[in-house]
Image: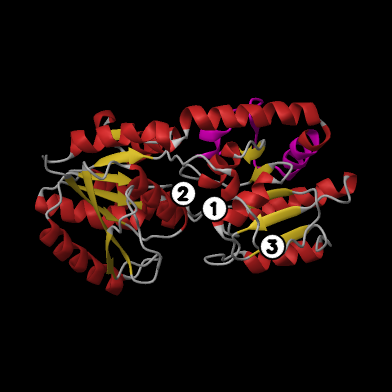
Amino acid sequence: MRKIKIVHILHAVGGVEVSLRLIVQNTNPDLYQHFIIHGVDDTTKPFYDANNDPVTSIKCSIVRDINPLKDTKALFQIAKQVNQLKPDLVHAHSTKGGVFAKIICQAKNIPCLHTPQAYSFLSTNNNVKRNVFLKIEKILAKLNNKILASSESERKRALNEVGYAKNRVLVFPNAINPIKNQDHQLSIKKTWPKTYICSVGRPSYQKNIELMVHGLQELKVKNPNIHLVLMGVGLYSPNLDRVKKLITDYQLEENVTLLEWTDRKDIFSIVSNAQLYVSTARYEGLPYSIIEALALKKAVVATNSDGNRDLVKNNYNGFLIEESSSEFAKKVDLLLSDISLRKRFEENAFVRFNNEFNIKKTISNLEQIYEKEAAV
């Protein structure tokens, strides 16, 4: 039986990279052959399939931001590679991957799936930019491709705002492998208190870390020893200086630990030992950080935004809040003080993970989609 040949196109950073690694590591290598086209300056780590064999990886001039010269060069480079590989299916990840794949697949009549992992038009509060990004998505939606949404929220965006027909929007929620005990042994020196809350998020418009700091300042009035460990504040953190200034202005230097780069095992260790997990994101695709928190039996306080609301059921495994520092402080304080409620949420968190976001149980759904959509 011939393997289905799938080409993935993306800028391999953050959750987009995590998603692809999980896909190629969990799909059946006897049935699917993956090829990965990604940026010259993104990940340097090789990709491996379920047999731990390396996956063919091809680097092109794909960059994170809009760059007409590099983007045009990347389009021709990717088209050349796709022409040589002759895939049965192209799976694009993130906005950049989606733009390239939709244009190339239209020209070459190749089936195309696009997983936005959070639409680009959500990434700004500038109405002009937002409308331009949305218009581009609407134009590309008229080409021959389908959306493979990472969450129900993303599916609704594709239908209601971008304008895809219902039969052209599929869903495969982000999912992870179960986290084993040996997967979260702390390798870095611990410099923060024994009791703390935590989050993963680069200071940016999307993650809205400023709201988290405002909430922390309100929490400190009642709980002077409150401590936040914030991971992932290194690369692509445009608001880092603003966040640091807020911390200084509120005299929270002793209440916040900023970790610029953190190994995934260290992240698991820090989340596992935290009192609870928090997120103040304005939007997400389906955040791996919260999925990991559920897998590690953590209650969550999160903004009621795309992605977050797909993982946190209010008053079941955590609290969904509006974009309010006082509400953030109130719900965090409640979970820190009501241990029985927090324990109930923690048990429900793991049940939710195991039933819906355990990739060992859900990967067959993606394989069925690949089999149906591929030109074989």
Residue 340: image location, x then y, percent? 78, 26
The residue lying at 47 percent from left, 29 percent from top is 356
Q: CA distance from mark 3 to mark 1?
A: 18 Å
Residue mark closest to the camera, 3 vs 2 = 3
**Left or right of 254, for residue 319:** left
Residue tagged by mark 3? 258
Residue 357: image location, x then y, percent? 47, 34
Under mark 2, the amino acid is Leu
- Estimate how packed mark 1 is, as few (under 14), some (14 to 19) or many (20 or more) residues with alpha carbons within 10 Å: some
First-in-chain label (1 vs 2): 2
The residue lying at 89 percent from left, 51 percent from top is 224
Q: Can residue 171 be seen?
A: no
Residue mark closest to the camera, 1 vs 2 = 1
> Which of the image's four quarters has the C terminus?
top left
- Estimate how packed mark 3 is, as few (under 14), some (14 to 19) or many (20 or more) residues with alpha carbons within 10 Å: some
**For this rendering, which residue is in front, 190 or 329?**
190
Do the residues under discs 1 and 2 have CB atoms within 8 angstroms? yes
Under mark 1, the amino acid is Gln
Instruction: Specify the segment rendered in magenta.
Output: 305-334
Residue tagged by mark 1? 206
Q: Does the segment drawn in magenta span residue 139?
A: no
Residue 313, located in which quarter of the rendered image? top right
The residue lying at 72 percent from left, 46 percent from top is 274
Residue 122's tag is: 2
Helix, strand or loop at label 1? It is loop
First-in-chain label (3 vs 1): 1
Q: Does the segment drawn in magenta span residue 323?
A: yes
